[in-house]
Image (cartoon, rainbow, N blue to C red):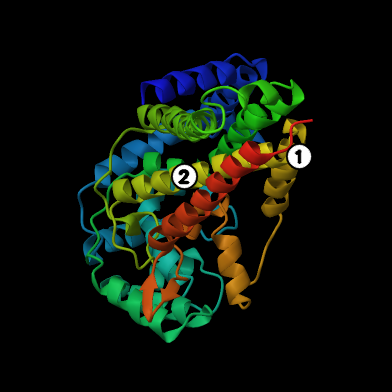
Amino acid sequence: MNNLKTLIGYEYKKIFIRKSTWITFLFAVGITLLSCFGDLMGNVYIEGKPVYTHYQEMKTDRAYARALAGREVGDTLIGEMQEAYGYVPDVPLYSATEEYRTYARPYSPIYHLVRSVLKYTVDETVTPGHILKFDATDYYKQRDIAVHNILNKENLTGLEIKKLLKMNEKVKNPFTFYYTDGYHSIMTRMYTIGIILFFTIIICLAPVFANEYYERTDQLLLTTRYGKNKGILAKLSAGISFGIGICFVILLTQIVPTLLIYGTDGWNAQIQIINATTAYHFNVLQSVLILCGMTVTASILISCISLYLSAKLKNSFGVVVILGSFIILCLFLHVPQQYRILYQLVNALPMNLMKAEGTFSDYFFIFFGKCFTVYQAVPTIYGLIAAILLKSSFKSFKNHQIS
């Protein structure tokens, strides 16, 4: 065991001694940090003139939302929102009016909660007029109708619809409003951050086996005492743990600054404050943690694939080209929901697990008549694939012909 730890430490040294590791890592951290501030840069323009900065806008909206925190989203609060929006003139750019900024803007989060339900129950584009005419006492009935409409439009099986409706019954009504922009920001940026993370892992791990071939040290390694067993295990262990470690660093680089900027408010708010029509019944913090868990799971698989290709291709550049091209291709890959199997396969790719709609999909994996959510089924599937890849990587390097 001590020998294995020593060998793993040596493999870490080989990873960190490469300039490409540090350049890629620092670039990833820098881009991740920059993304935390990206939405707050620049000015808000009305009729071509800057009126305030995005940072000032965020602070104003945060103050308004905090003033509503802890209140039930019921007929009283919705009625106040309707009264406030009643002052806004019926013009195309109503958000630029003084009436909107004075009366309606403090209630804009409630407006969007109502609008997110009505867009699935009204057969036309939802306007402020629809919101004003909406029966405030009918919100949760309309929400249930919206959930049913969404499920009926998707290509779901009867088992999935039954499970989702059962999940929806556990959603707490009425909602209690909290300011959740910090966690919402983390969730919406997870996809972009995930792509940066994957490229970092690929570039850093591509040389793990490939460099041994390139530098002809594979001949020496495989003839040493531990070369054909612990030496290879050390490479695989270092590679996987490095991928996990980089994942945690990137996640913390995103989460900590974001919560410092926006605040940690609303961690215990139900997820419906962000997505009113979802049938899942987690709170906001649980949802973020599940997304983080899926990111770690995806990072492990990407690490395993990188190590496998490094052992097989004997060329680190080829590993980066193949996996990089695959990730870029997936950015433009869209499969309609009617092609259910293909849609689920694409949805289960590591990149798509970074999206909230991917992890909290309405499409389940069905085994032996039981439904399993994406975050329940995919880690098990990834674990099996990872085990096969690691075993293949071990055998490939151990049994290759030394030239």
In the image, what residue occupies the spot 46% across and 76% down? 150
Classify 10 Å Cα crowding around label 2: few (below 14), some (14-19), many (20 and above). many
> Which labelled disc corresponds to residue 288?
none
* Residue 250 location (% of width, % of height): 48, 30
Q: Amino acid at mark 1?
A: Val
* Residue 35 location (% of width, % of height): 55, 32
Taking the image as drawn, is residue 397 in sight? yes
- Please name the residue that numbered disc 1 is placed on: 321
- Please name the residue that numbered disc 2 is placed on: 295
Task: Pick the residue in front: 278 or 116.
Answer: 278
Task: Pick the residue in front: 118 or 372.
Answer: 372
> What SS does tag 2 mark?
helix
Task: Name the quarter where the C terminus is drawn.
Answer: top right
Distance between the alpha carbons at the discs numbered 2 and 1? 22 Å
| Tags 2 and 1 touching, CB below 8 Å | no
User: Which is more foreground, mark 2 or mark 1?
Assistant: 1
Task: Name the quarter where the N terminus is drawn.
Answer: top left
In the image, what residue occupies the spot 63% across and 35% down? 202
Q: Amino acid at mark 2?
A: Thr
Q: Is residue 351 above or below residue 223?
A: below
Q: Earlier in the sequence, mark 2 or mark 1?
A: 2
* Residue 239 location (% of width, % of height): 53, 32
Q: Is residue 269 above or below residue 250?
A: below
> What SS does tag 1 mark?
helix
In the image, what residue occupies the spot 54% across and 30% down? 235
Task: Pick the residue in front: 41 or 50.
Answer: 41
Q: Is residue 240 above or below residue 378?
A: above
Location of residue 289 (image quadrant): top left
Location of residue 314 (image quadrant): top right
